[in-house]
Image (cartoon, rainbow, N blue to C red):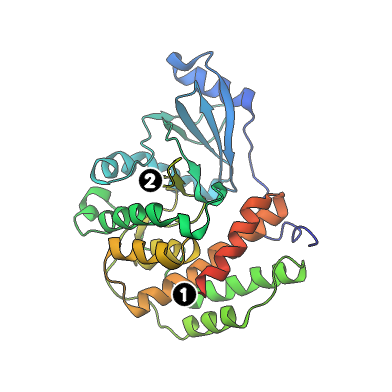
């Protein structure tokens, strides 16, 4: 393996907050946290995340394009949380832009758990997590959730549209192949071609997490679903957008458990979900290769194989 793909994915942040800056920003706006311990909890291409005082998680945007999503999280997540069967972040502390940091940020109570991508769980050990996620998505996608969510954009990134996502998936897969990170698979190509024959989605939409992949489901020490995090792409969308995790993150008995808990999924919804899952896993694989995250890379590549498996 040759390593990364040369940062073609555009992972470099526009603004990175250090531990010292986070301590100053949090302590300056929330007096009860002044002097509290601050440590890096996680980083992604959109946010730098800190654990403050062992109890609060603060998310600082890394690029301006996500700011509308940050504002939606602050406004909508407190309304959604009580109606969902798994914990989600509830922004209780909303930070204001200031001279030291030009963008809004927020803090929520820490939700313990490990990213599914980092859990090391074998596919056969994911049944309990899958069952919990299926019940969660059934509740999230219920029609009664729409009034709680208020005005949300409709699939702003066209994630339910294979005509948009398939070409982007092909670009990422080609870079992974050139870097000797991934070996081209005829089954993946066939799936993407099948998806490209679908017309635009015109059916009903539901409240959607919008970016539900293997880093955004937390599992606990008993391999159960513990929380769903990172809601910056919260929107109204075809349920396939969230169901993509059923195909990229689960296989065999675990996928069966997830879909049984969720309810019937039609063939077109499944196809849209599978195409998006290829794109998301390819994006995660490219990010992991470029940033040296070996476990995430292995999980993302396995996810591509899951998508075209049973």
Answer left or right for 289 relative to 99. Answer: right
Identity of the residue drawn at 63% across and 39% down: 15
Label drawn at residue 131: none
| Residue farthest left in this picture | 144
Q: How far separated are the C-alphas under marks 1 and 2?
A: 36 Å
Task: Decide if residue 241 is in sight here.
Answer: no
Helix, strand or loop status at disc 2: helix
* Residue sitting nearer the eye, 136 or 220: 220
Task: Name the side, left or right, on which 78 lies relative to 8.
Answer: left
SS for dot 1:
loop
Mark 2 = which residue? 72
- Residue 110: quarter of image: top left
Disc on res. 310 = 1
Q: Is residue 275 visible?
A: yes
Q: Give the vertical position of 99 relative to 203 (above or below).
A: above
Q: In which quarter of the image is residue 181?
A: bottom right
Q: Percent x, y for residue 151?
A: 29, 53
| Crowd around label 2: few <14 · some 14–19 · many ≥20 (10 Å) | many
What is the residue that sits farthest to the front in this orientation?
A: 124
Lower position in the chain sequence, tag 1 or tag 2: 2
Label 1 vs label 2, nearer the camera: 1
């Amino acid at each position: 393996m040759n390593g990364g793909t040369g940062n073609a994915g555009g992972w470099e942040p526009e603004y990175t907050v250090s531990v010292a800056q986070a301590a100053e920003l949090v302590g300056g706006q929330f007096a009860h946290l002044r002097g509290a311990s601050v440590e890096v909890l996680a980083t992604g291409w959109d946010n730098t995340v800190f654990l403050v005082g062992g109890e609060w998680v603060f998310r600082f945007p890394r690029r301006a394009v996500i700011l509308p999503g940050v504002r939606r999280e602050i406004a909508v997540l407190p309304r959604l949380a009580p109606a969902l069967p798994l914990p989600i972040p509830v922004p209780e502390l909303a930070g204001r832009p200031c001279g030291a940091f030009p963008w809004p940020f927020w803090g929520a109570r820490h939700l313990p758990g490990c990213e599914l991508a980092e859990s090391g769980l074998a596919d056969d050990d994911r049944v309990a997590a899958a069952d919990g996620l299926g019940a969660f998505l059934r509740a999230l996608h219920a029609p009664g959730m729409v009034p709680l969510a208020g005005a949300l954009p409709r699939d702003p990134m066209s994630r339910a549209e294979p005509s948009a996502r398939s070409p982007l998936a092909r670009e990422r897969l080609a870079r992974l192949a050139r870097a000797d990170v991934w070996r081209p698979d005829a089954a993946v190509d066939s799936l993407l071609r099948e998806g490209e024959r679908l017309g635009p989605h015109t059916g009903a939409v539901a409240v959607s997490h919008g970016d539900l992949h293997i880093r955004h489901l937390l599992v606990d020490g008993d391999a159960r679903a513990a929380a769903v995090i990172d809601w910056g792409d919260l929107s109204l969308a075809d349920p396939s957008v969230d169901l993509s995790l059923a195909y990229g993150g689960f296989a065999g008995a675990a996928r069966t458990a997830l879909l049984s808990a969720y309810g019937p999924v039609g063939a077109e919804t499944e196809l849209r979900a599978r195409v998006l899952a290829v794109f998301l896993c390819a994006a995660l694989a490219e990010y992991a290769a470029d940033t040296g995250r070996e476990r995430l890379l292995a999980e993302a590549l396995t996810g591509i194989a899951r998508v075209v498996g049973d």
